[in-house]
Image (cartoon, helix red, strand yellow):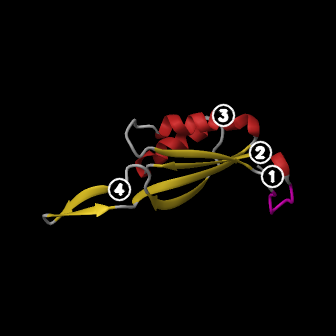
């Protein structure tokens, strides 16, 4: 099993959710986060004064899937989240050793 963690722009959330649903995977976990990468924040102006916003709002989407679904889901997320500008985000894929559905006690792929 694999865990996909995608950090995306807030305005791309609906597109990514739609892409995951179209790929046959409607389940996800969502966290509102703040951070920055190479773009190091941005300069904004308020009442004539400039200030730097170092931490930008982002969303982290987490999906646990079987190994054979991983490539299709990462492609769907990347395609929906891409704008071509700095700050589009990142996708991290890691191994999941086991999962258990609390309600039924199922484990492994059956619990996904």
In the picture provided, is 74 more to the left or to the right than 98?
left
Mark 2 vs 1, N-terminal side: 2
Q: Quadrant of residue 68?
A: top right
Mark 3 vs 1, N-terminal side: 3
Mark 4 vs 3, N-terminal side: 4
Q: Quadrant of residue 58?
A: bottom left
Q: Nearer the viewer, residue 29 or 44?
A: 44
Q: Nearer the viewer, residue 90 or 74?
A: 90
| 3D distance between C-alphas at marks 2 and 3 | 12 Å
Residue 55, horizontal then vertical, whole percent: 39, 61
Q: Which residue is mark 3?
A: 71
In the picture provided, is 23 more to the left or to the right than 17?
right
Query: What residue do we see at 40% from left, 37% from top?
Result: 83
Give the residues drawn in magenta, as a range: 100-106
Residue 13, horizontal then vertical, whole percent: 48, 48
Q: Is the Cβ of the residue at disc 2 closer than 8 Å to that at disc 1? A: yes
Query: What residue do we see at 63% from left, 38% from top?
Result: 73
Q: Please tell me the numbered disc located at residue 97.
A: 1
Query: What residue do we see at 57% from left, 35% from top?
Result: 76
Q: Which residue is mark 4?
A: 41
Query: What SS does tag 1 mark?
Result: loop
Q: Quadrant of residue 26?
A: top right
Local packing at callout 4 (Cα closer than 10 Å; few below 14, some 14-19, many 20+) is: some
Q: Which residue is mark 2?
A: 1
Mark 4 vs 1, N-terminal side: 4
| 3D distance between C-alphas at marks 4 and 3 | 30 Å
């Amino acid at each position: 099993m694999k865990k996909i963690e995608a950090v995306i722009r807030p305005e791309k959330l609906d597109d990514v959710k739609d892409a995951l649903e179209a790929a046959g995977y409607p389940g996800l976990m969502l966290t509102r986060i703040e951070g920055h990468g190479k773009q190091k924040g941005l300069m904004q102006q308020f009442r004539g004064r400039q200030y730097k916003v170092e931490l930008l709002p982002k969303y982290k989407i987490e999906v646990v899937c079987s190994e054979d679904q991983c490539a299709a889901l990462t492609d769907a997320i990347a395609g929906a989240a891409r704008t071509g500008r700095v700050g589009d985000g990142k996708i991290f894929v890691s191994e999941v050793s086991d999962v258990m559905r609390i309600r039924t006690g199922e484990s492994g792929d059956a619990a996904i």
